Image (cartoon, grey):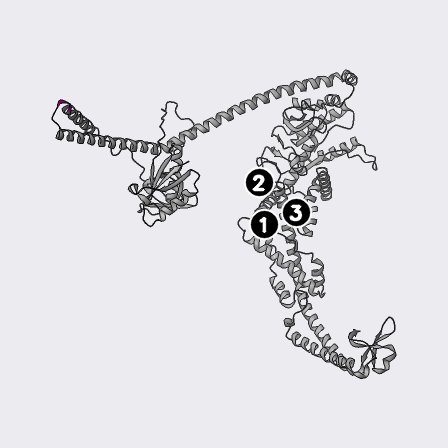
């Protein structure tokens, strides 16, 4: 029984692997490997396969999202300094002694891995999956420290590596000097003139020797270690330096033993940690694989998915692809959008040759494979692709001359395998089903296969040229049509898929465009089977009706869109009026108050003039009438005083830190950053500017929601827009607050059509004046500015001429 299960599992894997090749998966892996920085991770990528388990797919996608986050925050995290050190660690584990250069390579690699772990550890909360991956890395920093403390950057053992090595090397140098000094004296001796071939000290067989002419060998007794190629020179170690050289060589050997002891100690440490070192390097390769997939996802400009929504298990197993592009085609690809619903698991795609049908199949299949490999897919974020337990494809001509397998036989064998292993949790992709045989029988087989898959609820995308298959799909409750069409004028492919509309092959139209003799086309139409013609006519009629419905639907959607836009604009205006109601009422109140005061002033002037006229002239009836009129006006005004509480400003209470508020007199939105309940002012920020503003000048920025079903009987209220003021008084304000007020004042003044205004800033220390005039110097709304005349305030105010 277990053998049968293993055999079936092996066959299912083989069918899935064959589908990977048909869907261009290896080409994608090759592209991804170019984004890795470590040779071992390149190998891992090229052997990578999709996961068919939902939990694994979610983890893979989350790792890629975290990798993209890390790349955004830390730039190009690289494993390029990591080298393959398995051979070194294996040799060390077998008691081998590593060279200094090999130990340094191990140290550099371990340092790089440890640094990567350190960087990622700072993002434990943001990148939990990648952080968990780096937890596999064992801390062996003591080993790298030991290597670097005992070896120089070029791999030599340091003098201080052991207590004996430094003094021993000093003795070696001294012994060497004794030998060379003795030999040098021999070279310089007068009695050896003409005996020495070359006055340099040479080394032969690890011994220090002199170069003596062959015919003068008897002049310097010693041991001959070598002879030149020309036999003109012999290399002699004089008897007088043999003992000195022996001492030097003994010290060298003792030094070598001490160096070997250090290298042995370091190599043993590497051997003891070999398993941890190999695991660290392998973890770094896994990390580089994650980063390579992240870089590739960035290259595709793929949106970062919400994993829980992206692979959420849906009972209906809907495939919904929006704006997808084949990764290999890149920017040249026409975006593809299609849906396979819950109750119609079969999508039949028809259309002309080279119209985009096969590319559409490969796009959907490849995106599903990439998704289950943890790679973000190049499609709109609204795209939803379930996790499939198998993705099976039969695409292209797979005939084999060696095995005497025809195209039709190959397709049937593939169909047998796919049907054997697919179920309701699988995705099946079939290209040109029922081809490579008699059309009538091929169409019948195609319909039978699709009906079987539909009844088994297997998600299936299929392309066909058989009109009978498209007609069957149109009449079936388990299938639906989609089509690629040609441009109506040029008959060139549009590569645009249209859902729910069956397509045609356009063979006759294309043949006509390509110049086929009209007589042949006439004969072809004559011999076209009646059934085929009837089905084509039926599909044409359905296609035309669907296109008309699509046009009506599109027009309706545009109308609804315009209505929605108008509604939003109206709601925005209502919201604006609601927000500005207090300011408008306040403006009217101030305007009425000013006119009331002006009327009282005019009345005072009239009363004064009448008094003067009484003093300088005789009484007359006109003066009496004027006096009566003034008294009547005074009575009317006294009986109708201007209410003091006509406008009640918000109290400014109930604010909290973080609240969004409006500075009413400046019409600016701000955020409360600091406040005390007992204080009259609160600190707010407007953009990057901090201000202290009185609570009575603030109100909450959120107005009551405008209900969509506002009563139609609600009266509409309109308010005239207040005119601009001629002057702005910023005395008592801080410099930052005054600049905000100035900006709003200048804008309101230009809107109101004013050409000249002034700002009252007072004299004081001059800081406020300097801030105001610095802002005016470069302001685009200001033509020029200057101090007011002495009787108008002098340097205490600034006159501004507006553009």
Q: Look at the numbered discs 3 and 2 and tell me whether their residues touch, using CB distance below 8 Å.
A: no
Identify the element where label 3 is drawn. loop
Q: In the figure, residue 461 lies in which quadrant?
A: top right
Q: Nearer the viewer, mark 3 or mark 2?
A: 3
Q: Nearer the viewer, mark 1 or mark 2?
A: 1
In primary-sequence order, the first of circles 3 and 1 is: 3
Q: Nearer the viewer, residue 569 or 178?
A: 178
Q: Locate residue 187, reporting x and y percent.
A: 78, 80
Which residue carries the number 2 mark? 305
Q: Quadrant of residue 255?
A: bottom right
Q: Which sits in the foreground, 77 or 202?
A: 202
The answer to which image quadrant residue 604 occupies is top left
- Label 2: state its secondary structure: loop
Q: Which residue is mark 1?
A: 75
Numbered badge on residue 35: 3
In the image, 518 versus 441, the foreground residue is 518
Residue stretch in magenta: 618-622
Residue 138 visible here? yes
Q: What is the secondary structure assignment of the residue under circle 1?
A: loop
Crowd around label 1: few <14 · some 14–19 · many ≥20 (10 Å) = few
Horizontal relation, residue 575 to residue 263: left or right: left
Majority secondary structure in the magenta region:
loop
- Residue farthest toward the left in the current orientation of the protein: 618
């Amino acid at each position: 029984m277990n053998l049968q299960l293993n055999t079936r599992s092996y066959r299912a894997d083989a069918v899935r692997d064959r589908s990977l090749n048909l869907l261009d998966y290896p080409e994608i892996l090759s592209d991804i490997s170019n984004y890795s920085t470590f040779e071992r991770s390149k190998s891992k990528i090229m052997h990578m396969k999709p996961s068919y388990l939902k939990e694994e797919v979610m983890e893979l996608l989350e790792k890629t999202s975290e990798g993209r986050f890390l790349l955004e925050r830390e730039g190009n995290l690289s494993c390029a300094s990591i080298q393959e050190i398995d051979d070194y660690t294996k040799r060390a584990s077998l008691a081998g002694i590593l060279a200094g250069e090999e130990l340094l390579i191990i140290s550099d690699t371990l340092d790089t891995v440890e640094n990567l772990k350190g960087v990622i550890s700072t993002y434990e909360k943001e990148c939990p999956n990648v952080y968990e991956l780096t937890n596999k890395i064992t801390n062996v920093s003591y080993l790298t420290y030991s290597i670097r403390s005992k070896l120089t950057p070029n791999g030599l053992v340091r003098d201080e590596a052991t207590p004996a090595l430094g003094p021993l090397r000093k003795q070696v140098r001294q012994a060497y000097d004794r030998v060379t000094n003795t030999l040098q004296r021999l070279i310089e001796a007068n009695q050896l003139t003409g005996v020495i071939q070359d006055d340099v000290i040479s080394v032969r067989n690890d011994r220090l020797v002199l170069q003596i002419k062959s015919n003068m060998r008897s002049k310097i007794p010693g041991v001959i270690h070598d002879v030149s190629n020309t036999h003109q020179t012999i290399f002699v170690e004089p008897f007088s330096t043999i003992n000195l050289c022996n001492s030097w060589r003994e010290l060298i050997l003792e030094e070598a033993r001490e160096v070997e002891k250090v290298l042995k100690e370091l190599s043993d440490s590497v051997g003891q940690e070999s398993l941890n070192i190999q695991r660290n390097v392998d973890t770094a390769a896994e990390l580089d694989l994650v980063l390579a997939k992240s870089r590739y996802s960035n290259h595709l400009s793929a949106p970062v998915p919400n994993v829980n929504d992206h692979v959420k298990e849906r009972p209906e197993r809907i495939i919904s692809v929006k704006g997808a592009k084949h990764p290999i085609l890149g920017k040249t690809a026409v975006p593809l959008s299609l849906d396979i619903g819950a109750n119609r698991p079969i999508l039949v795609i028809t259309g002309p040759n080279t119209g985009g049908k096969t590319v559409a199949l490969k796009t959907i299949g490849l995106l599903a494979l990439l998704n289950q490999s943890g790679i973000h897919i190049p499609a709109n974020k609204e795209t939803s692709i379930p996790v499939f337990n198998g993705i099976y494809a039969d695409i292209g001509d797979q005939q084999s001359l060696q095995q005497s397998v025809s195209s039709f036989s190959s397709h049937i064998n593939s169909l047998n395998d796919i049907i054997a292993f697919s179920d309701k949790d699988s995705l099946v992709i079939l290209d040109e089903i029922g081809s490579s045989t008699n059309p009538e029988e091929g169409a019948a087989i195609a319909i039978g296969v699709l009906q079987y898959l539909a009844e088994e609820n297997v998600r299936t995308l299929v392309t066909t040229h058989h009109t009978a298959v498209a007609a069957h799909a149109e009449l079936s409750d388990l299938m639906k049509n989609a089509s690629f069409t040609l441009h109506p004028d040029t008959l060139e492919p549009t590569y645009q898929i249209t859902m729910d509309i069956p397509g045609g092959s356009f063979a006759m139209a294309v043949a006509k465009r390509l110049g086929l003799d009209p007589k042949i086309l006439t004969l072809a139409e004559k011999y076209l089977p009646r059934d085929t013609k009837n089905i084509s006519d039926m599909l044409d009629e359905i296609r035309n009706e669907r296109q008309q419905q699509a046009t009506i639907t599109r027009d309706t959607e545009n109308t609804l869109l315009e209505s929605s836009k108008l509604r939003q604009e109206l709601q925005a205006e209502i919201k604006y009026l609601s927000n500005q109601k207090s300011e408008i009422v306040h403006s009217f109140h101030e305007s009425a108050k000013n006119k009331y005061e002006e009327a009282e002033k005019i009345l005072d002037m009239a009363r004064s003039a009448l008094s003067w006229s009484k003093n300088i002239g005789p009484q007359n009836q006109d003066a009496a009438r004027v006096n009566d009129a003034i008294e009547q006006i005074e009575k009317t005004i006294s009986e109708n005083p201007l209410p003091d509480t006509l406008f009640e400003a918000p109290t400014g209470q109930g604010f909290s830190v973080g609240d969004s508020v409006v500075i009413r007199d400046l019409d600016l939105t701000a955020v409360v950053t600091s406040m005390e309940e007992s204080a009259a002012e609160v600190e707010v920020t407007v953009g990057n500017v901090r201000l202290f503003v009185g609570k009575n000048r603030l109100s909450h920025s959120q107005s009551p929601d405008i209900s969509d079903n506002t009563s139609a009987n609600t009266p509409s209220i309109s308010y005239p827009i207040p005119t601009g003021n001629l002057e702005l008084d910023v005395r008592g304000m801080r410099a930052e607050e005054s600049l905000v007020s100035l900006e709003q004042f200048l804008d309101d003044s230009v809107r109101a059509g004013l050409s000249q205004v002034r700002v009252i800033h007072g004299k004081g220390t001059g800081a406020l004046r300097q801030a105001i005039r610095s802002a005016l110097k470069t302001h685009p709304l200001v033509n020029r500015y200057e101090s007011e005349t002495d009787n108008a305030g002098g340097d205490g105010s600034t006159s501004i001429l507006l553009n």
